[in-house]
Image (spheres, helix red, strand yellow):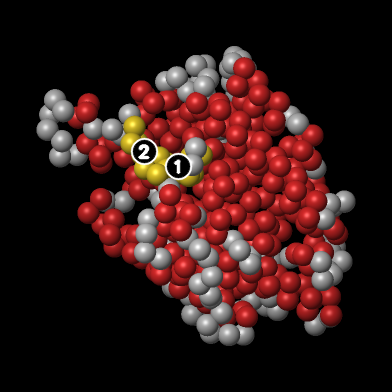
Amino acid sequence: MSSEDELRIAVSRRLLLEDALWIGDVLASASEHRGRAQVFAPLLLSGHASRIVYEGRLLLEARDPQMALPDFVAMLPPATHPSIALARHATKMLDNQNSKDKTLTDFEKDVHNAWMSQQSLLRRGVRPGFKWMQKDMGFYTLGDRVVGSTIALHLRFGLNDVRPDTYPEFFQRFGYDLAASVRVYSYLSGETDAISTTQDMAALDEVGDNDRFVERYLEPRYDSRLSPDQKLLLLLIESEVNTATTLIPLVSRGHQNAAFRARLISLWHGLSSLVKILDASPTAISPATGRMRSIVKSSPAQTLLASKEMRRIRNRCVHYEIPRTLAVNFTDAPMFGIIESLSDQTLDSLDTLIGDLGSDLSESLRDWRNG
C-alpha cells in the first residue's frame, strides 16, 4: 500500500471517529442528564446521528478492501434500522431525492401525508363531534427559534408505515442501533471507552413545547401565496437551520470539527431547499419573502451553493470515504487540509461564513414565519 493510500484511509477513518465521538458525547451526556434535554437532545439531533451511523457503515463496508474493516462491521447491528436511512436522508431536506425526477410537488405530498397520518393518530379515540378540538401539530422552540416539529419528525421516522402499537419497540430498537453503532465507531480510536460525557445539557432543558392547529397556525405565516403543505416544508427547513445555528453550538464543546461539518451540511441543504420553494412560487412577493430571496441570492449564499469546490467540501462533510480520484494535500490543518486543498477557503474562514450566513438566515426565517 502506498503512503498516499495509507494517509487517505487514515483520514477517512479519522473523520468518522471525530463525528462518532461528538454524537456519542451528546447521547451519553443526555442519557446521564436529569431534565428535558434527556429526551430532546437525541430527538432533535436524530437526523445528524443517523447520518453519522449510516455513512459510517458505508465506510466500514467499503468496496476497497484496504478501506473496509469487516471485523468492525461484524460488531454492528445486523441490519440498518429503516428509520436510520430515512432520518439520514431527511437532513438533506428537499435535496432528499431518490431520483432526479422528484419534484417539489412530491415533497408536498410527502409532508401532507405525514400531517394527515399524525392528525389521525392524535384524534384517534376522540369522541365524534369533538375531533376539531384536538390540535394536530406540535413544534419545539429554543428561545424564539423553532428547532423541530412533530410532523417533520413523523416524516423523518417514516411513521406513516409503522403501527402505533409498535412504537415503543420501534424507537427502542432505533435508539439501540444508533448507540451501538456509534460505540463501534469509537473503537477506531484504539480504545473501548473513548466516548466521554462532557456536554452541559442544561440549556436544552429550555426547549419548549407548542401545540397548534396546523391550518389556523400557518394561515397568516410566511407568505399568503404559499400552500399549507409548502409552509410545513418551510417549518421543516427552519427547524433544521435553527438546529444548526442555535442548538448544535450548545452541545459541541471540544468537537469543533464535527460540529462544523454538521452545521455546513444543514445550512447547505437549507439554502438549496429554500431556493426550490422560492423558485416554484414567483407570485409570493411579500416584503419578508423578498428578504428571503435576497439572502439566497447573496454573495455568501452563492459562495456556498454555486461552486464545484464547495460541493466537494460538502461531500467530504457527509461521506467519509475519500476516493483515490480526489487530489488532496493532507496536512495537520483542521479537517486535515481538505478545505484548503479543494478551495481558496480555510476552515476558519468558511466557519465564519456559515456562522454569519446561518445567523442571518435563522433570523429572517423567524421573521418570515411571524409575519
Please provide percent x and percent y for residue 280: 60, 23
Q: Nearer the viewer, residue 149 or 63?
A: 149
Q: From the top left corner, tell me how far across and down residue 234 is, in percent.
A: 52, 33
Mark 2 is on which residue type? Asn
Which residue is disc 1 drawn over? 141
Left or right, residue 15 beside residue 98: right
Q: Quadrant of residue 313?
A: bottom right
Above or below, 354 against 33 in this view is above
Give the residue drawn at x 52%, y 22%. 371
| Residue at the image position 25 percent from the left and 39 percent from the top | 122
Instruction: Say which element carries label 1.
Output: strand
Which residue is pictured at 42% across the width and 54% down the height? Answer: 205
Which quadrant: the N terminus? bottom right
- Left/right placement of residue 228 relative to residue 323 reads left
Q: Residues within 10 Å of mark 1 (few under 14, many from 20)?
A: some
Q: Is residue 353 visible?
A: yes
Whether residue 12 is situated above or below residue 314 in the rendered picture: below
Residue at image location 60% in from the left, 21% down from the top: 288
| Residue 209, position as x, y percentages in the image | 37, 43
Q: Earlier in the sequence, mark 2 or mark 1?
A: 1
Camera-side residue of 213 and 273: 213
Quickly name the residue at label 2. Answer: 210
Left or right: 171 as drawn, with respect to 361: left
User: On residue 231, which mark appears?
Assistant: none
The image shows residue 139, relative to residue 75, as above or below, that is above
Question: Is 213 displayed left or right of 133 in the figure?
Answer: right
Residue 181 appears in view: no
Between marks 2 and 1, how big is the CA–CA gap?
Answer: 8 Å
Q: Residue furthest bottom?
A: 191
Q: Which picture quadrant has residue 174?
A: bottom left
